[in-house]
Amino acid sequence: MQAILSIEWMKVKKYRTFWILSALFLFMLPAWNYGLKNGVLKVGGNGVNILNQVYSYSYVWENIGYWTSLFVVFLSVLVIILTTNEYQFKTNRQNVIDGWSRLQFFHAKWGMVVVLSLLTTLYVFINGVVFAAAGGSMSGFPGHIEKLFYTFVLTLNYFSFSLLLAFIFKRSGITIGIFFLYSMFVETLLKSLLNWKLSSNPGNFLPLQCSDELLPFPLMDMLKTIAKMQSETNNAYYVIASFVWIIIYYLISRRLLLKSDW
C-alpha cells in the first residue's frame, strides 16, 4: 500500500488544482475561526460574545469540527477531480498496463481518501490547540478531545461519498454538480420530509446527514449543557450509521469498477 500511495502522490504533487483546493481549505478554516473568535460574528450583548466560549477546551474540538464540515467541500471536490481525471486522461488504463490490477487501482483511491481524512483531522487538532491556547492556558488540555474523532468520521464519509460519485459518473463537471445538488439541497429536503412524516428522526441517518449530526452548530451543545438536556439520539448510533454508509460506498464502487468497461 505504501508503494501505491507513493505513486498517487507523484500524480498530484505537481498538479496545480490539488494545491489550490488544498490551500483554500487550509486558509479558510483558521481564517474563519479567527474571525469568529475576534468578533466578526457576535452572539450576545453588552460586549459579551458567547461564541468566544466555544474556543475553550470544553467545546473547541466539536466547534472547529463543525466549521470543518462546511469547508471540507473543497477537499471533496478535490477527491472527485483526482479520480475523474484518471478516466479523462486514461491513466487508469496505464496503471493496469504498468502491472496494477483493478483492485490495486481501486484501493489506491481509497487509500488516498483515508490519508486525506487523517491529515484533515490532524489539521483540525492543530487548529484546536492553537485557538484554545490563545484564549487562555493549556490547563484545560485536552478537554473533550474524543470528539475530534467525529471530524475523522465526517471527513471519511464525505470523501468516500465523493469517491463513489466519481466512480459512477467519471466526469468531473457532472460529478461535482451532483455532489453539491445532493449534499446541499436533496438530502436537506429528504431529511426534513422524513422527520416530518415519520417518528424517531430517520432523516438524521441519511448518508451525509448522519455524520453532520455528530458535529452540530457550536452553540447547541453549550445550550444543552446549560439546560441539562440530553441529545435525543446517542452519537454512537450516528458513528455506526456513518461507517455503515462508508462500507456501502466501498462495496458499490468496488462492484462498479470491477464490472465496468474502462
Image (spheres, helix red, strand yellow):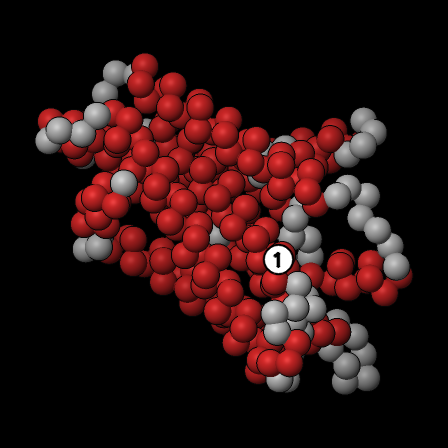
Q: Is residue 257 above or below residue 116?
A: above
| Quarter holding residue 183 | top right
Image coordinates of residue 149 in percent, x first then y, are 57, 53
In the image, what residue occupies the spot 39% across and 50% down?
Answer: 116
Q: Could you say which is closer to the camera, residue 114 or residue 48?
A: 114
Estimate how packed mark 1 is, as few (under 14), some (14 to 19) or many (20 or more) residues with alpha carbons within 10 Å.
Answer: few
- For the residue marked with disc 1, what is the amino acid? Glu
Which residue is the site of mark 1? 146
| Quarter holding residue 205 | top right
Image coordinates of residue 216 in percent, x first then y, are 68, 53
In the image, what residue occupies the spot 40% across and 35% down?
Answer: 163
Quadrant in which the C terminus is drawn:
top left
Q: Is residue 213 above or below residue 123?
A: above
Image coordinates of residue 21 in percent, x first then y, are 36, 55
Residue 90 visible in the shown view: no
- Number of marks in the rendered image: 1
In the image, what residue occupies the spot 13% across and 29% down?
Answer: 99
Q: Is residue 9 above or below residue 88?
A: below
Q: Is residue 202 above or below residue 4?
A: above
In the image, what residue occupies the spot 54% across and 73% down?
Answer: 129
Q: Is residue 44 left or right of residue 36?
A: right
| Quarter holding residue 90 | top left
